[in-house]
Each structure stands twice: as C-alpha cells, then as structure tokens.
Amino acid sequence: AQTVTQSQPEMSVQEAETVTLSCTYDTSESNYYLFWYKQPPSRQMILVIRQEAYKQQNATENRFSVNFQKAAKSFSLKISDSQLGDTAMYFCAFMKARGGSEKLVFGKGTKLTVNP
Amino acid sequence: DAGVIQSPRHEVTEMGQEVTLRCKPISGHDYLFWYRQTMMRGLELLIYFNNNVPIDDSGMPEDRFSAKMPNASFSTLKIQPSEPRDSAVYFCASSFGAPAFFGQGTRLTVV
C-alpha cells in the first residue's frame, strides 16, 4: 500500500521569503502522479501543482515549484515570495497512474502561516 | 463546468437521525471519491467508485455508513443512525486520470 508522509505539522515564514515543505512517499509503482493541494480556511481543496513520475523535469507553477527526487521518493514544495494568501494547510498526495486503482492517498498535512 | 457540487454545505442533526450527503461530479469524470476530514485523523478515504461501481469501501467506518452512485452524475453518502463522532467535513472528489477535483465539502455536526 502507498503511504505519504509529511514530517512538518506546522511551519511559518515571513512574507516575501521562501519556504520549503517536505513530503516523502512509499510505493512499489513505477508510474504515478504526485500532487500538492492547498486548503485555506475556506476549506476548499485547491490543486497547487502536479508531477508525473515519468517526467524528470520538476514542475513549476508561478511561485510554486517542486523538487522531485524519484529514487529517494521525495517530493518537496517550494513557495517563493510568500504571500499572506498562501496561509493554508498543504497536503501532499499520491495517485497511481491509470491502469491501477486510482485512489488519491494524502499525507497528514502541513499548516503554513505567512506572517506580515 | 461548475466543478464538483456538494450539498448541503452545512448540516446539523441530532444523534440517531439519518443524514444524506449529495455529490454531483464533473461531467465526463469516471472516478468518484468520498473523503472525511477531521482534526484527529486528517483526510480519510471512505469509498470510491469507477464508472458508478464501488471499487473499495474498506474505509467506510461501519455499517451505519453507505454510499451509492446510481448514475454517472450523482452520488450519495448516507449515515444512519448518525452519532456525534461522525461530526466532520465530508468531501466528494472526481477525476478522469489525474488530478482529482474536490467539491467544497459538507460540514456535518451531530449533536
């Protein structure tokens, strides 16, 4: 069974600075997806960024980027130029690629606070 | 598309009552998931469907919980009878491949 581990329950960062959230996962699959979801106080689950395991290039979405280390089974999220609106819970998630059971497995989350 | 639609947004009910949560997935999506979120346990997968067929319901906590997907555009999660420990936010999500898109959740409070 796949597992996702987020070792940082809480983090804080000053506005405009950079912060990195950690995520490790365990799987025997070779083809899968990894995601970071953001959950602000509104409780909506918002997709931040996705990474396909077969792609060596790290995904980037504006101020959000990942460091995907497949051999180490690590998938960290870097937020650059942090903004107050980035304050939220961040969840790392794993999904097998099509052909297997496609359930989304989540980590426990990291609560990020951006301070003014 | 309007995204995944859940109703109601909030539900307050008395212990012992039946509760039904509803979900309309994104059109064309073939997977539908029901998750429960609590402070203690985080996001738990309760059950998921593929093409309206339940694939894995091992996360359903007990027989009081049941879920159906009568067609591709509608699913329900029912709790009967409800208990205070069922209080949580219940999310529905749907996908076609990846990623999964979430509804806004139903906050259930059982008093």
Image (spheres, grey):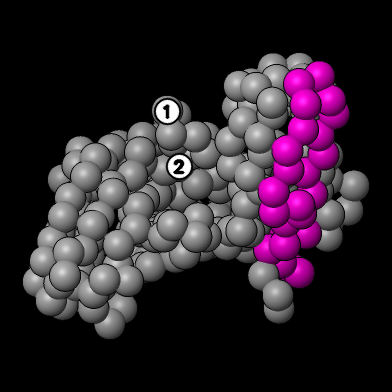
Q: Is residue A83 above or below residue A102?
A: below
Q: Secondary structure at mark 1?
A: loop
Look at 24% across and 40% down and name the residue there: A9
Please report, as a chain letter, where disc 1 is located. B
Q: Is residue B29 above or below residue A70?
A: below
- Within the magenta stretch, is there residue A60? no
Tell me the number on the disc at residue A105: 2
Q: Dots 2 and 1: beta carbons under 8 Å? A: no
Camera-side residue of A96 and B17: B17
User: Which quadrant is the C terminus of chain A positioned in?
Assistant: bottom left
Camera-side residue of B2 and A33: B2
Look at 72% across and 62% down and name the residue there: B5
Q: Position of residue A41 (x, y in %)?
A: 44, 57
For disc 1, the neighbor class at 10 Å (few under 14, some 14 to 19, many from 20) is few
Quadrant in the picture for residue B24: bottom right
Magenta region, residue range: B4-31
Can residue B57 be seen at all in this image of the molecule?
no
Quadrant in the picture for residue B28: bottom right
Tell me the number on the disc at residue B90: none
Gap in angstroms between the C-alphas marked 2 and 1: 17 Å
User: Which quadrant is the N terminus of chain A positioned in?
Assistant: top left
Camera-side residue of B95 and B76: B76
- Within the magenta stretch, is there residue B20? yes
**Tag count in the figure?**
2
Direction from residue B11 to residue A28 in the image, left or right? left
Q: Secondary structure at mark 2?
A: strand
Q: Is residue B24 above or below residue A10?
A: below
Q: Amino acid at mark 2?
A: Val
Foreground tag (2 vs 1): 1
Labels 2 and 1 share a subunit: no
Q: Position of residue A15 (x, y in %)?
A: 15, 72
Location of mark 1 (residue): B40
